Image: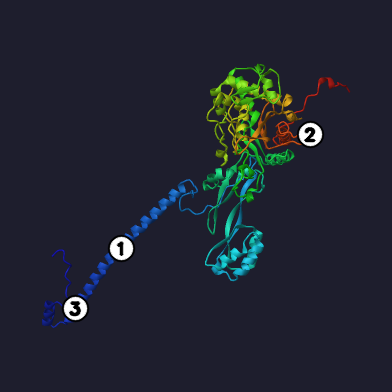
Amino acid sequence: MSDAAPLRIPLRPLARILHAREKGENPDAIERENLRLRHEEMRDRARVRAEGRILVLGAVFTLAFLTIGVKMWMVAESEPAEPRTSFAGAGIVAQRGDIVDRQGRVLATNLDTYALYAHPHQMVEPERAAEELVEIFPDLDQERLLKDFTGSRRFVWIRRKISPEQRQAVHDMGEPGLLFGPREMRLYPNGAIAAHVLGGAGYGEEGVAAAEIKGTAGVERAFDDYLTDPANGGKPLELSLDLTVQAAAEEVLYGGMRLMNAKGATSILMDAHTGEIISLVSLPDFDPNDRPNPPTEGHPDDSPLFNRAVQGVYELGSTLKIFAAAQALDLGIVGTDTMVDIRGPIRWGRHTIKDFHWYGKELSVADIIIKSSNIGTARLAEGIGINLQKQFLANLGLFEATPVELSEAPSGAPLIQKNWSELTTMTVSFGHGMSISPLHLAAAYATIANDGKRVRPTLLRQTGPQDGPQVISAAAARQSQRLLRQVVTEGTASFADIDFYSIAGKTGTADKPKPTGGYYNDKTISTFASMFPAHDPQYVLIVTLDEAVETSGDEPRRTAGWTAVPVAAELVTRIGPLLGLRPEIAPVPLADITLTSN
């Protein structure tokens, strides 16, 4: 019975009622008294329940405030950081970082604009709207617009980005079914300058209120994660390019390409110690603000999107001869004055190696480079051997795609013969049988200019020189530098012997291969690989012309000495002062100085 609910006392207990009647008392008084006691008991129980509830509620509020207070303290004590938005389900990231040159000048930035779309079910006059939209945007199809506006579609994209003037014109139409969505568009304020480096950007994930800008080529694509990472706090991507030098190089190269009747051209200016690419030009080019579509037919290099500096893999001819000489000097096989038998031609099966001119029975190593003897270079390669030659070229980076920060770089991997025979060793020594890009050549020449230490090309601003591995000895590298200077003063690159700046370099002319196999008889790839100032090389400059021909004489001339060298000389003259290089003034002979006295 202890677990049973307490029994309620009756309001009119019989015993007390009978007893009251016996005494002549009013029984109703007993009922009123019992009713009062019952109400007091009920109030006491209700008060206890209320006090318990208030206590529990107070405990809950106290715990909640303590939890919030601890969380606020933890947030206040933590380091502020923007969350990354790359996880699934995140909103569209609209902001994209700027790209600047080495001086902080803007190469790529964002511009607020609008997209134009339609809700056909909200349109009042779809026919008039279609007609007036075509007047504002002539590239639109009026019939298509009218079909979309009068069909069953409830949403129609019209233009992904429009100018402020176009937005105002659409606004003035007064059509309620035409709506604007906020956008950011990628803007390249310098137009086509550095187009192949920047590449371009377009829209990725897209919504009505925002659109994600994604890189499509060049550094825009290579650094897409960096440029869209909110954790960078809007810090721009700083390139090694110099906008002023880049603009001057493009102007000179374009003039040279036209003057030499070339199909295309490329130039690379590279710091020989830091590996920084100060200028990279590929012509023809394009405006990344209006990037053309990739070609669907024809050869890739017919498109202005083709980056000849990186993707153009060519046999670069005699520019490679200096590597054979440098390695032979480094191994101690020869000295610069060592005489080499150049009697030829050299016959290997059905292949013949011969020189462009007859140079006699023997030449010194220096004259082999100065006069550009194929036979002499092949003899040096024979002395070096297959394995040592392959290892040396690999150490120069000529067996792998360049590590430069461009999305197109992996597609410019060298073309290497699988069966590397003794004949391959000889032909590769003078630039045939192996195809590399002009950027490969720039990096290899930078290694020679850097006293034999490997230099890797980069498009990012550096704070100091690279400390790469020693590919050849400093002594052999300096001997090679002097040989390249003699090529200019005594050999095939005489047009580069200009006033004010001393240039060292090597010419190279190679027949252009046909897509179907074999070589053209009247089309060449002409290259001049150089470094300056010659006495203390600071920069490497590569100029390559595609199908160039100089026509000022009685017969067309296609060799690099007549085509690429004059263009490179003009380039050095123009960009030398922009690089802060002081002109070299030739000393006046003492015999021409007359002493006078006041």
Quadrant showing the N terminus: bottom left
| Image position, residue 277 (x, y; %) | 63, 36
Badge 1 amino acid? Arg
Q: Pick the residue in front: 484 or 517.
A: 517
Q: Which residue is mark 3?
A: 31
Q: Which residue is mark 1?
A: 53
Q: Is residue 452 left or right of residue 255?
A: left
**Image-quadrant location for residue 528:** top right
Label 2 CA crowd tier, 10 Å (few <14, some 14–19, many 20+): few
* Label 1 to label 2: alpha-carbon separation: 111 Å
- Please identify, in this view, whether the residue under mark 1 or under mark 2 is nearer the observer: 2
Q: Is residue 529 visible?
A: no
Q: Which mark is residue 554?
A: 2
**Image-quadrant location for residue 246:** top right
| Image position, residue 124 (x, y; %) | 58, 71
| Image position, residue 53 (x, y; %) | 30, 63
Label 3 CA crowd tier, 10 Å (few <14, some 14–19, many 20+): some
